[in-house]
C-alpha cells in the first residue's frame, strides 16, 4: 500500500482523535456521555457497518480465500495464546502482573478500533477478514479470557459470546457465503446506521486519551518491550509468513493491521466488573493506542 495513501488516511484518523481530545477538555464528552456513545457504537453502529459492508455486494473474495482467512485467524490467535505465556517471561514482568500481559497479548482492539481503521485505510474485501477476526476474538474472550483474567474464579459466559456485534458478524458471513441480496431501502438504512462508526469511535478514543495520565504510563519499560514484540515483530512475522504462502495481498494487509492494533478495552472492563486491579491494563491501553498511530502508519505503508 502506498505510503502517502496510508499517511493521509491515518492523518484523518488522528484529526478525529484530536477532536475527541478537544471535546473532552471542553467537558462535552464526559464520564456520563461516553458510556452511552460507546454502547451505541458497540451494539448498533459497528454491527451495522459490518453488515452493510457485505450487503453492498462489492466483496469479491472467493469462498476458498474466505476459508483460508478462517484458517489464518485460527493460526494467529493460536500464536497469540502461545506468546501470551512467553512474552511476560521474556520481558520479566512481575508475577502478579503476568495475567494482565496475557490479556494484552491476546486481546487487541480488533473491533472498536480495528473495524473503523480497516474501513478507512483498506479496501472493502479486507472487511471480510476483519469480521472473521472479530468472531474469533469474542469466542475466545468469553471462554478463555474471563477464566484466565480471574485466575479460574470466573466461568465462561457463552451468553455474552453472542453479542450484537458477533450476531451481526455471523449474519454478514452468511450473507457473503450465500450471496444474499436485499432491497435497496434496507441496504441504505443499514449503511446510514453504520456510517457514524469511524467518527464516533475516534472521538471516544480521543476522550480516553484526554483523560489518561499518558506521560506517567510511558515510563513503564515493560510496556515498551511488550510493544516491540507484540505490535512490531508479530505483524512483521505475520506478513512474511502470509507472503511465503502467497496469500492474497488484501489478506496480508488485513492481518498485518489486526496484529498491529493496540490493547483492547474488553479485558479492562471485565477486570473492573470482577474487582481485579486495572492499572496495568489501563497503562497498556493508553500507551499502545497512542503508539499504534505510528506503528500502523509505518507498517501499512510498506505492506
Image: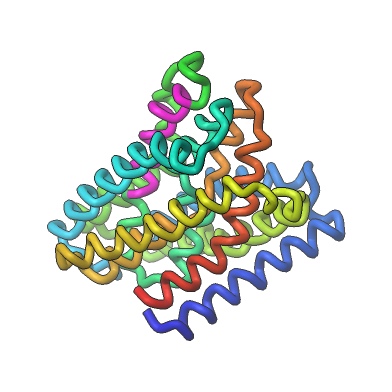
Residue 94 lies in magenta, yes or no? no
At a point 54% along the width and 34% down the height, the residue shown is: 100
Q: Residue furthest right?
A: 26
Q: Horizontal placement of 246 versus 163: left or right?
A: left
Which quadrant is the N terminus positioned in?
bottom left
**Residue shown at 69%/44% (left/top)?**
36
Query: Residue 19: image x %, image y %?
Result: 73, 67
- Quarter of the image for residue 51 reads bottom left
Front-most of residues 114 and 276: 276
Left or right of 228, for residue 224: right
The residue that appears at 78% across and 42% down in the rendered structure is 32
Of 241 and 24, the residue lying toward us: 241
Q: Position of residue 172 (x, y in %)?
A: 32, 51
Query: Which stretch is magenta?
Result: 133-148
**Percent position (x, y) of residue 163?**
45, 36
Q: Is residue 168 above or below residue 95?
A: below
Q: Residue furthest top?
A: 153
Which of the 4 image quadrants contains residue 233? bottom left
Task: Report if residue 56 is visible in the image.
Answer: no
Answer with left or right where residue 162 lies relative to residue 280. left
Percent across and percent down for residue 256 are 36, 62
* The C terminus - image quarter: bottom left
Say if residue 90 shows up in the picture: yes
Most common secondary structure along the magenta stretch: helix
Residue at the (13%, 57%) spot, across then down: 64
Amino acid at each position: 500500500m502506498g505510503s502517502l495513501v496510508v499517511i493521509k488516511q491515518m492523518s484523518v484518523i488522528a484529526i478525529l482523535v484530536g477532536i475527541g481530545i478537544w471535546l473532552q477538555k471542553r467537558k462535552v464528552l464526559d464520564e456520563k456521555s461516553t458510556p452511552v456513545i460507546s454502547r451505541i457504537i458497540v451494539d448498533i453502529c459497528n454491527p451495522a457497518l459490518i453488515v452493510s459492508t457485505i450487503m453492498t455486494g462489492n466483496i469479491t473474495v472467493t469462498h476458498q480465500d474466505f476459508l483460508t482467512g478462517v484458517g489464518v485467524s485460527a493460526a494467529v490467535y493460536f500464536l497469540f495464546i502461545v506468546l501470551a505465556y512467553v512474552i511476560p517471561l521474556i520481558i520479566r514482568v512481575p508475577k502478579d502482573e503476568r495475567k494482565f500481559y496475557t490479556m494484552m497479548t491476546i486481546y487487541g482492539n480488533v473491533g472498536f478500533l480495528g473495524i473503523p481503521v480497516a474501513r478507512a485505510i483498506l479496501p472493502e474485501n479486507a472487511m471480510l477478514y476483519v469480521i472473521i477476526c472479530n468472531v474469533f476474538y469474542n469466542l475466545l474472550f468469553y471462554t478463555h479470557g474471563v477464566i484466565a483474567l480471574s485466575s479460574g474464579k470466573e466461568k465462561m459466559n457463552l451468553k455474552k459470546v453472542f453479542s450484537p456485534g458477533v450476531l451481526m458478524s455471523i449474519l454478514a458471513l452468511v450473507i457473503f457465503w450465500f450471496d444474499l441480496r436485499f432491497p435497496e431501502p434496507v441496504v441504505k438504512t443499514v449503511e446510514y446506521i453504520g456510517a457514524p462508526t469511524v467518527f464516533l469511535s475516534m472521538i471516544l478514543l480521543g476522550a480516553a486519551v484526554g483523560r489518561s495520565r499518558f506521560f506517567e504510563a510511558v515510563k513503564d519499560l515493560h510496556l515498551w518491550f511488550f510493544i516491540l514484540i507484540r505490535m512490531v515483530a508479530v505483524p512483521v512475522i505475520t506478513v512474511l509468513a502470509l507472503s511465503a504462502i502467497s496469500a492474497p495481498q488484501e489478506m496480508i494487509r488485513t492481518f498485518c493491521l489486526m496484529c498491529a492494533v493496540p490493547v483492547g478495552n474488553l479485558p479492562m472492563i471485565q477486570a473492573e466488573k470482577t474487582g481485579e486491579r486495572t492499572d496495568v491494563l489501563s497503562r497498556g491501553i493508553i500507551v499502545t493506542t497512542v503508539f499504534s498511530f505510528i506503528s500502523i502508519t509505518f507498517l501499512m505503508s510498506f505492506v
